[in-house]
Amino acid sequence: MNKKIIELSNINLTYPNGKLALKDINLTINEGEFLVISGESGSGKTSLINTINGIATRFDNCSYTGEVFIKDLDNENLELYEISREISNVFQNPKTHFFNVDTTSELLFYLENRGFEREIMQKKLDELLKTFPIGNLLNRNIFKLSGGEKQILSIASSFIADTDIVVLDEPSSNLDHKYTKIVSKMLRELKNKGKTIIISEHRFYFLRNILDRVIHIKDGRILKEFTREEFYNLSEKERVSLGLRSIIEPKIQISKDYLNKEGSFQIKKLHYEFGNQKRGIHIENLNFNVGDIVGIIGENGVGKSTFLSYLLGLKRNADLIVYLNGKKINKTYLTKIGGLVMQDVNHQLFADTVEKELTLGLKKSEIDYENNYSILESLGILTNKAKHPMSLSGGQKQRVAIASVVSAKPKLICFDEPTSGMDYNNMIKISNLIKKISKNNIIFIVSHDYEFLNKTVNKLLNMQEYSIYYEKI
């Protein structure tokens, strides 16, 4: 008989604003079990994870009724450092995970704080690198990493900590397919070591042969529970009715024949280099027209997000020549006609309500309230219009950022991972909105989400094809 390692009894979790995030949660997790938590954005997945690891009460100032036990010890009677000796965490936003500037120090941070000898730390690092090919992430500035590289670093840090319980919140949301396979291998290794794994996810294909059980949350309640076999035998109709993403690995289906012979928007030249990394991006003679929705793919760190920054004139050290309707335009003009939804939307939410976020920086004569409400409704966040954007879930914040950019009606719109950590229904809402507004815009979308790209884009730009490596003299 399996020994229980975590037990939640009659949990009702309330946030400081009075929102009841979890309702009547009863859940037992056994030692060595691999549990997946599924559900729409804002359903309570992160709240459940943060109740288990103690963050909900100690950092989010939540309160709960009921009981949480970890290894038969009452969670409320444990100090956070005591919980951390049992549970490693991978947060939804990897930037909140880091305490160091360089990557190697970050990997060893937990072990160093526990007082492990240098020889033991080196041994654990060597074991990690022997099993997983992530040596390219060592001895690098964390601030120079891509979003996906930061995510893999935070997962590796939890792996090397070697705690009995590992909790992960959307660990694959910004990962390319290469790194997703590495994470899958990491999780399998952890399971083989007897670790207990709790993971909140929207992608399921990379967990197919690893997970033991899936619980599905809706409105703060556990709605359904599945064994591995039951979950992967769901019909398409059943899966979609639950708002679940594909359970089969999606393959890109858009033709690579994306080059227009002529276009109203022409990238004659875009060259940039990555400092001392001896590589860069060289793009020449790409043509696009109004109505084009261009998916941008490529491995983590190849330069996709950087491409968007240069394309919008947000960075100045690139060799850039762009024409619009036959006229050469400068970087300043690009910033005027462009809009960007960033990968980390926390950097672009400033107003104290969702409604005000959509009017921020606009003149009264430029505000179209009817259109703004229509956008919010199409994204399923109209009921949140009076709420503070930073009080929302990660997926809801993502949709607020999308709404704020779209409402400004730029001619050139760039999205950087717009469906990161997004459930099926909200992915479809974002896809439908982008297709609707594309009639009057040129849209570029950086994404590893092939399921989303297949439903949305009509052109494809593979950044790997424009990546060059060189030796400096």
Image: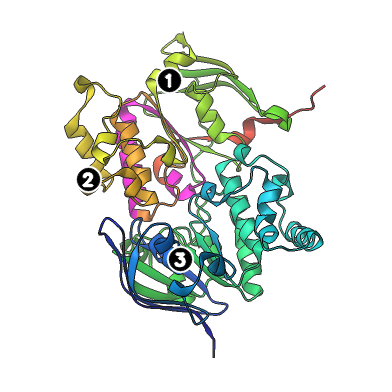
Sequence order check: which comes first, mark 1 or mark 3?
3
31 above or below 367?
below
For the view shown, which residue lies furthest in the left direction? 370
Residue kind at label 1, given as amino acid type: Thr
Question: In the image, is residue 119 part of the stretch drawn in magenta?
Answer: no
Q: Secondary structure at mark 2?
A: helix
The image quadrant where one finds the N terminus is bottom right
The image quadrant where one finds the C terminus is top right
Mark 2 crowd level (few <14, some 14–19, many ≥20, 10 Å Cα): some
58 above or below 384?
below
How far apart marks 1 and 3 lie (CA) works out to 43 Å
1 and 3 marks in contact (CB < 8 Å): no
Sequence order check: which comes first, mark 2 or mark 1?
1
Q: Main secondary structure of the magenta part?
A: helix
Q: Which residue is mark 1?
A: 335
The foreground one among 66 and 80 is 80
Residue 244 is situated, as x and y percent measured from the top left of the image, at: 38, 61
Whether residue 465 sits left or right of residue 399 in the image: it is right
- Residue at 72 percent across and 32 percent down: it is 277
Q: Which residue is mark 3?
A: 54
Q: Which residue is mark 2?
A: 382
- Residue at 57 percent across and 46 percent down: it is 148
The foreground one among 66 and 419 is 66
Sequence order check: which comes first, mark 3 or mark 2?
3
Residue range in magenta is 425-454
Mark 3 crowd level (few <14, some 14–19, many ≥20, 10 Å Cα): many
